[in-house]
Amino acid sequence: MTRELWSIDARDPRKVWAALKPALDGSGAAILPHPASPSGLPETVPANVAVIVETSGSTGRPKRVMLSAAALKASAAASDELLGGPGQWLLAVPAHYIAGINVLARSHCAGTEPVMMATRDFSATTFVEAAAQLTEERRFVSLVPVQLARLLESEEAVAALSTFQRILVGGQSIPVALLATARARGLAVSTTYGSSETSGGAVWDGKPLPTARVRLVDDRIELAGPMLAEGYLDDPRRSAFSFRMQDGVRWYRTDDVGELVDGVLRVRGRADDMIISGGVKVSIAEVENAVRSLPGQDAAVVVAAPHPEWGEAPVVITTRAIDLDVVRQSVSAQLASAAAAPARIMLIDEIPLLSTGKPDRLALATVVLK
């Protein structure tokens, strides 16, 4: 059994909202929200697929993740349990992101009308204006770290954020200092970890959603639960590698490494971001988080580069000048490792970004090697 697949112009979130509801109810076609015109789409997909999310991570080729209505509804139900019930959502991230699709799916399951921002023009002013349109007492929003950082610079935006029962922040690692600042302002911020393959955030504040499970296999993070994707569109080999059955449980093998401390997951970074510098394992993600905690460096990016003495070493790429010794001392102290100290700093005019808004790490790695 199959159903039609439609590409939906995600530049207008109202179009995604209108098409998502019948996709979830089974009365309409499956949809692939996209900010452009994707190529190579089949006319039909398996009947249980409701939404396809095209993801182009910071490395590797794009993937088209197949999500069933049951998976998205399971994610929404588990989220509601942690949130203490349904409410009204503000859509502040693009509608083709899994976080944006989740906002709309949760709204549909709750029977509430989301307020949808024009995310291309995101600012403290537009956020405050959008928040003022919410009509329900219980209100929620999903943000990425850079959005939260921008809002914390505005007292009006902080006041608006204080009216939300929960502010979910995900999409990438949030700097420790940023999270601490938000919570010190009294904001109900929760960090989320997950991916399109898990219908978005399946781990909140280090703990899995009520119906989700987490484990480590050789330090690699694996997730299970009813919110898992069906696999990848027209890519059975990748599907078989990433989704595996064991003892009757279907697990998704992530690209991240982490550790569990008293049942709380700490994500250390991508498995392919671990380097050996001077014989010591160093997580590029941890170095980047440490650098981003420094004043004015919240958008800095850290990549690995060859080093004549240590083999590999972290390199900081930033648009704001900062003294190398200051960075090295701070990173070494934060991570309790001299090997983690960046070898050099590159100052550039602008950080190249992917269509998802994340740094283009492949392009930056190429810049470092020149």
Image: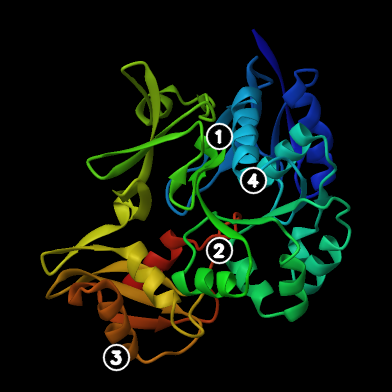
- Residue at left offset 10%, top offset 65%: 279
Above or below, 167 against 129 in this view is above
Could you tell me if the residues under marks 2 and 3 are in contact, i.e. CB atoms within 8 Å? Answer: no
**Residue at mark 2:** 353
Q: Height in image: 89 above or below 299?
A: above
Circle 1 residue: 64
Question: Mark 4 and mark 3: span between their CA atoms?
Answer: 44 Å
- Position of the N terminus by quadrant: top right
Residue shown at 37% from the left, 92% from the top: 323
Vertical arrangement, residue 222 with respect to residue 71, above or below? below
In the structure shown, which secondary structural element does the residue marked by tag 3 occupy?
Answer: helix
The nearer-to-camera label among 4 and 3 is 4
Residue type at the position of mark 3: Asp
Nearest to N terminus: mark 4 or mark 2: 4
User: Which quadrant would residue 341 be assigned to in this image?
Assistant: bottom left
Mark pair 2, 1: CA separation = 20 Å
**Could you tell me how far apart the alpha carbons at marks 3 and 1 are, in whole angstroms?**
43 Å
Residue 325: which numbered mark, if any?
3
Q: Which of 271 and 259 is in front in this view?
A: 259
Q: Could you tell me the amino acid type at mark 4?
A: Leu
How crowded pointer 1 is (Cα within 10 Å; few <14, some 14-19, many 20+) is rated as many
**Gap in angstroms between the C-alphas marked 4 and 1:** 29 Å
Q: Which of marks 4 and 1 is nearer the N terminus?
A: 1
